[in-house]
Image (spheres, rainbow, N blue to C red):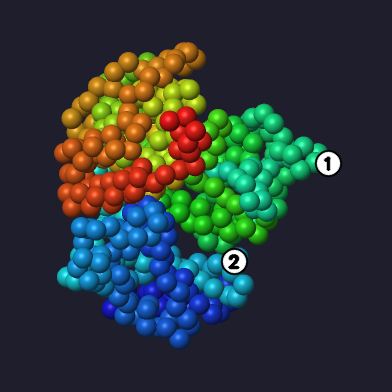
Amino acid sequence: MAKKKSLLSELRAAERKHGQFESLDLLIPDLSGILRGKRVRRREFDKVTRDGFVFCAGTTLLNSLGEVTSGVPYGADDGDPDLPARMVPASIVPVPWAGKPMGQAFFRIDDADGSPFFADPRTVLENALRPFAKRGIRPVVATELEFYLLDGRRENIVAGTPKVPGTDRVQPGAQVYLPDDLFEVEGFLDDVYDWCALQNVPAEAAISEYSPGQFEINLHHIGDAVLACDHAVMLKRIIKAAARKHGFIACFMAKPFEEDAGNGLHIHMSLVDKDGRNYFSQGKEKMALPPFSARLRHAVGGLLKLMPESTAIFAPNANSYRRLRPDMFAPVEPNWGVNHRVVSVRVPESDENNLRFEHRVAGADANPYLVMAAVVAGAHYGIKNRIDPGRMVQQGEAIVPKLRIPNRWDQALDRFARSKVLREYLGEDYCRYYTMVRRAESARFHNAVAPLDFDWYLRSV
């Protein structure tokens, strides 16, 4: 009963701070990381906070088009059943871009017996975290999201910024890290930061990335991996809302333009023990440079070992595989190094207190909860089995990455489906149904006749 009272008191506290809400958006991430849910009016507030509600369980297993997949449970085959749902504590925040006063909160789905529902992405991540928790180890994590701002006033897909002064033409060239690009979208960024503050999303640095109209916003490190993923999907929602307001379309596709850089979702992770000490900086075996123990090497070894079979998580869509090209600085080889941005797992410049790795493989289109779960699984598997990551790419070393992870959707799904290790961390049923949903999407995508078919073959064959 205490939890039910606390949710109602949280709602009242939020309204005292932000004003009375007329409605409340209740949100849950699906298999693709897309937020689904429903909007309730004020007269329903007391009921949903006190008693919870029921919701379509199959929502968490929808494909990227929002459709159910034949053969997957909790869909059309078995009557699309509801299960109990409850709001996530401490997730009530205002929606500052709404026309009328509105709040939002996450919710999660439970099985009929009250246990966490296996297909809720939060549950998948919590399952992956459990082996570390049993050892008193906690990941401290942060995410970085790349995206494009497209011109929302045109029918064709073009970058919305930066413009050549006095014209409507996009400035050519990468001009990476150019501060003037940030000034051109200053109003957009101001709204993003203001709205992040109102929604308790710890947004940090913003940079102009390697292609025209491409940006990156980083989130602060926190010691709650599930909450960090909440922040990531909330940030995407905020960026999309701010983009609409300023005449842009925010694009998180992994590869929107053939010859321009793709969008990544980078995961920074360190581990701390029950005393709050950096787990990677401890132990008897130490490398001379930088000063970390074998634990970090083993964690990286697990990440590299599981990378090919985890690619279906990191690259979940057809477009994802257009990003995985060695000639586009994409992380396509299970390699690692210190302070080197061409590798898949990078150890940034750091001291013994903040020693961490950066996992750079996932696209911005991936589900943050599942990406985090796969990264946690790889790190734990490597430490548990003392996996050697092999030779480290040296700082400043010139390398040409070789394609050694699947770069085709069906190949990646084959590797994922055969993985015994990921099933142990993410759940047997979840891995099976994830594969079914993505295989059906892949078949549908590749069976579609695209304009390129006519361009290449209409007159020539």
Residue at the spot of label 2: 96
Residue at 50% from the left image edge and 46% from the top image edge: 252
- Image location (x, y in percent) of residue 294: 28, 24
Amino acid type at image mark 2: Pro
- Image location (x, y in percent) of residue 104: 48, 68
Compared with 83, 142 (above or below) is above
Disc with the residue nearer the chain's start (2 vs 1): 2
Q: Residue 100's mark?
A: none
Residue at the spot of label 1: 166
Horizontal side of 77 relative to 46 (left or right) equals left
Quarter holding residue 403: top left
Looking at the image, the residue that sits furthest to the bottom is 43
- Image location (x, y in percent) of residue 125: 29, 50
Whole-number angstrom distance, CA of label 2 to CA of label 1: 33 Å
Horizontal side of 156 relative to 391 (left or right) equals right
Given this view, does label 2 or label 1 mark the residue nearer the observer? 1
Looking at the image, the residue that sits furthest to the right is 166
Residue at 17% from the left image edge and 70% from the top image edge: 113
Residue at 67% from the left image edge and 29% from the top image edge: 173
Residue at 51% from the left image edge and 71% from the top image edge: 103
